[in-house]
Image (cartoon, rainbow, N blue to C red):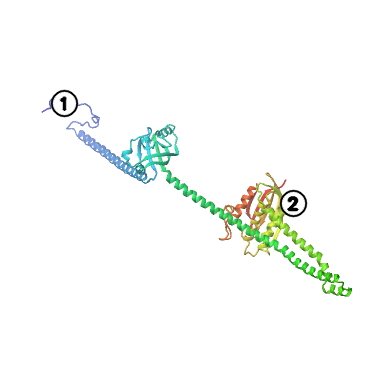
């Protein structure tokens, strides 16, 4: 029975459907029509299988994407939860859209109670940076760098140092800003620890520099003592001889003043060897004078080399500086060391002679240390003047017959605190200080290996005009 309000429509009058052409079935009673119908149903089933397979594939992909999305959300949630810095994400109007666990702890509220609230509600009225400042920064599409905020927390105002960056959607449009802040108390504690470590490092460095200075002073004192020992011993020995001569002359003169006769005086003259004393006195006095002058020269060198006139530049002879450094270091430590000094007189440079003397002593000391325990030991020091595009320069080269400088260490020998000497024999500051002194004199200090073995240290300075 047909439903009310509906008319039966003959089959032939049904409207064409999308599959009317594909599924038009031939009339019964035709063999060819039956075959066509079977093929049509097979095609439909195949299409359905393909559609189902595509749906299954899309379902698998969707589930994989959902799983990856859940993992990403879990990772982000774990990341936000593990952050110790306060994180607040706001939209362009300044309303909170996301917070992390540290923010919940700071404000004493759960995330759902903070979401949607204006940023101004989270800031204390005493905050140096206001919500309006944040919105103005967002409008200018700028970042926030190390700005001080004061948060309104249940425990009172909390000062934090905040950095902020704009947040963009997939289309590249700015949709808000992310603020990340750390309590300034933690930063101050970190800065305090850093400052203490820096001060400790400075004290340690000062101690090492002082140790290097004391080592240089020890070498200087040892060299000066060795240099002073010869003239002073000469003066001391001649002074004893002069004392004996004086005693003989006084005894002879006493007899003269006593009115002794000629025979007595002649006998006393022979016994006291007055004639020999008179002949030796000029040479003895000359030797004493020579020794005293040598001591005077050494003291003058010490006064000149120890002066601290850092800004005073003067013209000085490198030959004298080199000889003094060799005498005070090499001769006192290795008296049997063959030394060749080929520095011409008048090789004048401009600078502070005391500082250059310190450099030369250090270079000679390093050369002596490098040859310690070796069978073939020779120290060769040469000097020359030459023309360069930068002007006239002078150079002093110190060559030893030690093992040389390994190629791997060639670029590091002038670094502070780098040394190849055993513990207790060097601080690693000698060549570093020499390098700095050379630069202060508008010169340079260079290192190389000699083709026949050993190292060459070259000090190059501006020549006197």
SS at badge 2? loop
Quadrant of the frame with the N terminus = top left
Query: Horizontally, is 447 left or right of 73 in the view?
Result: right
In this view, the residue in front, 405 or 435, is: 435
In this view, the residue in front, 336 or 5, is: 336
Which residue sits furthest front? Answer: 258
Q: Are marks 2 and 1 in contact (CB under 8 Å)?
A: no
Q: Quadrant of residue 259?
A: bottom right
Q: Measuring from the top left, give residue 427's x and y in whole percent.
A: 57, 57
Q: What is the distance, in whole Å, between disc 2 and disc 1 at their CAs?
A: 131 Å
Quadrant of the frame with the C terminus = top right
Q: Quadrant of residue 45?
A: top left
Numbered badge on residue 72: none
Mark whose residue sits in front, 2 or 1: 2
In the picture of the structure, the residue carrying the numbered disc 2 is: 346
Q: Residue at x 33, y 38 (%)?
A: 114
Q: Residue at x 83, y 74 (%)?
A: 271
Query: Horizontally, is 384 left or right of 187 in the view?
Result: right
């Amino acid at each position: 029975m047909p439903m009310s309000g509906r008319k039966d429509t003959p089959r032939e009058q049904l409207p064409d459907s999308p599959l009317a052409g594909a599924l038009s079935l031939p009339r019964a009673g035709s063999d060819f029509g039956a075959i066509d119908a079977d093929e049509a149903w097979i095609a439909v089933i195949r299409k359905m299988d393909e559609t189902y397979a595509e749906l299954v594939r899309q379902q698998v992909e969707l589930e994989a994407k959902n799983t990856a999305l859940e993992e990403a959300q879990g990772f982000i949630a774990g990341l936000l939860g593990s952050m110790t810095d306060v994180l607040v994400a706001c939209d362009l109007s300044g309303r909170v859209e996301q917070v992390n666990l540290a923010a919940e702890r700071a404000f004493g509220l759960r995330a759902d109670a903070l979401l949607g609230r204006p940023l101004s509600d989270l800031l204390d009225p005493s905050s140096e940076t206001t919500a309006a400042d944040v919105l103005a920064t967002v409008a200018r599409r700028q970042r926030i760098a190390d700005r001080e905020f004061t948060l309104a927390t249940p425990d009172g105002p909390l000062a934090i140092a905040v950095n902020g960056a704009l947040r963009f959607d997939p289309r590249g449009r700015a949709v808000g800003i992310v603020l990340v802040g750390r309590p300034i108390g933690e930063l101050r504690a970190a800065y305090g620890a850093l400052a203490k470590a820096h001060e400790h490092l400075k004290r340690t460095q000062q101690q090492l520099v002082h140790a290097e200075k004391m080592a240089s002073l020890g070498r200087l004192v040892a060299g000066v003592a060795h240099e002073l020992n010869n003239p002073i011993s000469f003066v001391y020995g001649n002074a004893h001889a002069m004392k004996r001569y004086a005693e003989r002359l006084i005894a002879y003169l006493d007899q003269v003043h006593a009115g002794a006769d000629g025979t007595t005086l002649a006998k006393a003259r022979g016994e006291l060897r007055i004639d020999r004393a008179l002949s030796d006195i000029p040479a003895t006095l000359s030797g004493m004078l020579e020794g005293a002058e040598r001591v005077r020269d050494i003291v003058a060198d010490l006064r000149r080399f120890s002066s601290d006139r850092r800004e005073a530049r003067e013209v000085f002879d490198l030959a004298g500086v080199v000889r003094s450094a060799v005498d005070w270091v090499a001769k006192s430590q290795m008296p049997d060391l063959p030394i060749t000094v080929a520095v011409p007189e008048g090789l004048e440079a401009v600078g502070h002679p005391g500082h250059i003397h310190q450099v030369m002593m250090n270079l000679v000391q390093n050369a002596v240390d490098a040859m310690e325990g070796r069978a073939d030991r020779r120290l060769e020091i040469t000097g020359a003047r030459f023309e360069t595009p930068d002007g006239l320069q002078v150079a002093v080269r110190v060559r030893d017959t030690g093992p040389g400088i390994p190629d791997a260490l060639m670029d590091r020998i002038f670094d502070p605190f780098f040394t190849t000497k055993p513990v207790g024999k060097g601080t690693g500051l000698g060549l570093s200080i020499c390098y700095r002194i050379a630069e202060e004199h508008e010169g340079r200090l260079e290192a190389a290996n000699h083709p026949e073995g050993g190292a060459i240290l070259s000090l190059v300075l501006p020549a006197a005009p």
